[in-house]
Amino acid sequence: MLVGPSDKNRALDVLKAFGIEVVELSDEREAVRRLESESFDFVAVKRFPLSDSLAAALALRPSAKVVDLSSLQSGVLMDDSPGFSRLAAVVESSPIAIAVVSPSDFRIEIANALFVELGRCFGSVAVPEIKGLSMSAAFPEMVPVLDEVRREMRPRLDEAVELVCPTEVAVFKRIVTPVLNPSGDLDCIAILFLDVTQHLRAAKEIEALAKMIARRSARLDSILGSMTDALWLYDENGEVIDVNQSALTMFGLGSKQEAIRHRDFAEFQLRDREEKPLPLSRLPQTLALQGKAVPDYVAIGRHLITGKDLDLSIAAGPVHGEEGIAGAVLVIRDITALKELDRKKDEFLSVASHELRTPLTTIKGYTQLLTQSGEQTSLADRSLFLNAALGEIDRMMRLISELLDVSRIETNRFQLHRQPLEWIAFLEKLTSAFRVQYPDRKIEFISHVAEITIQLDGDRMRQVVDNLLANAIKYSKEGSAIRVEAMVDGSTVRTSVSDKGIGIPRDEIPFLFERFRRARNVSSRHYGGLGLGLYISKAIVEAHSGDISIASEEGEGSTFVITLPLEPKIGNV
Ligand code: ADP
């Protein structure tokens, strides 16, 4: 809006207070220049008739309507010239509630439709009386604010003023600004109310939505983080967007950035079950990006740090977006341990069948011999054959009992029947029995204590000592010495069984108490066994609140130590 020099400054000040750009010009030449270079909605001039040059400039701007400021009497909105009528209409229909009050008694001089409505809803007066009223009557709560603006002579902005009426609560942004006259005195005060209720409600909804999304994303992050399966997310171009922690640990990657660099898995050396390398075109993520779902693909990969092979089960699927395939998700499970278990199961089955078949073959041989030879076999030979067959039957029964014990331990059906037992006499008896059975072995028993009585399950403890002695004999050369030693150590009794046999590779010692565990220096052909004796022995000793341990050097020999608590004890030491 272009305005020539005018004494109706107050009107112009009010326009400025409403944020309408007002250009005041001191001379006509400047007005002509601006008209030629800029465009305006309307032009307000004080003097009529127009000078020729201004009229010519205006003729070139048909869109600009001319407003005669000299016709203004008392206030900008009273003007009935076309431009001001338009302006008045704009102010009147503005989405902002606007009012102008006098500085002395805060009387409402101008109020647009929305302000009148505001007064009706939230103020203390009814329509249409608001114009001409004092703010202290219409909006008493505004008076302190107006006082402040009048005192400070500075605009005041309140971001969220809450207005309450019986039917609603609304929030407004409020601007109260002083309007000064050319001499710098307060001419009037303009008040603007902008309804931000919807805006705030939307902002609150967005905030709640953002919080919900953040919560969901945190939950998702923690789920993905705690997953043992590795997760790889790809975008539609095959770039890695995200991976979880398991993906990093599975392949020995240091960071997500490193994972991003390994998008094509080249260094993981993926191979199929026949050990044939998987080219990029056959990788599950490539197929998924082409829209194909890859369910459980078994492959072999390599750990970057240890260089060890990993058995992997890989599943992949496309992620569908609004415009087709937006990416792919790849889930990798490390099944190395499962495969190892599978291998062990197969090995166990083959060892178990072999172990059970060997005595059966012997029994069958002796029985056939007895049937075929008939009367010719001497009584001495018959008894020899039958004893041999019985020995093999015992061996089979032992194996089957071991298997049953394992199942009892696993299902917590393992029970003890404790009775007072003279431990030294018990050990003496067992070693003597072995001496009789293996006359060519030197089996020593040394006790550092006269006798000690402990509450034990005798049958079960016999199983433990028998197993240790049988192992000592099985895993050492004929003629080499075996020593059983008992001593009291504080509140426990320590019993050791030592041999000078093949010993145990150091790295395997911690695992020998596990089911079906056999050390690598024990070939099943030479040394029969299922790898269950130590597992069962440990369960029995621990059920007695005791402990069993191994000290061994490969090629030197082994010592197995059982430690049992003396309490509850009966008898003398
Ligand atoms: P098994 O003797 O039937 O294999 P055990 O559970 O009694 O089963 O023993 C597990 C493994 O521990 C054996 O296979 C063997 O490798 C090792 N082991 C046990 N006792 C000895 C020993 N005295 N000397 C050397 N190795 C032994």
Image (cartoon, rainbow, N blue to C red):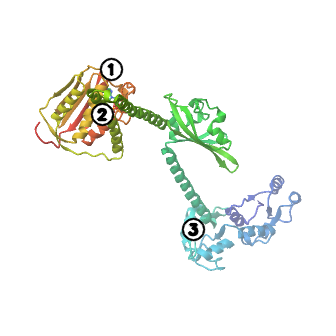
Q: Earlier in the sequence, mark 3 or mark 1?
A: 3
At label 1, the amino acid type is Gly
Residue 88 percent location from the top left of the image: 74, 69
- Image height check: is 274 above or below 228? above
Asked if marks 3 and 1 touch (Cβ < 8 Å), the reply is no
At label 3, the amino acid type is Leu
Element at label 2: helix
Tell me which residue sits at (13%, 31%) in the image: 449
- Image height check: is 184 above or below 241? below
Which of these two is toward me, 489 or 474? 474
Residue 134, visible in the rendered structure:
no
Q: Earlier in the sequence, mark 2 or mark 1?
A: 2
Asked if marks 3 and 2 touch (Cβ < 8 Å), the reply is no
- Image height check: is 228 above or below 511? below
Whether the residue carrying mark 1 lies under 8 Å from ligand 1 is answered with no
Ligand 1 located in image quadrant: top left
Mark 2 closeness class: few <14, some 14–19, many ≥20 residues within 10 Å: some
Q: Which residue is mark 1?
A: 555
Q: Which residue is mark 3?
A: 146
Mark 3 closeness class: few <14, some 14–19, many ≥20 residues within 10 Å: many
Which of these two is toward me, 194 or 554? 554
Q: Which residue is mark 2?
A: 390
Residue 531 percent location from the top left of the image: 36, 33
Q: In which quarter of the view is residue 332 placed?
A: top right
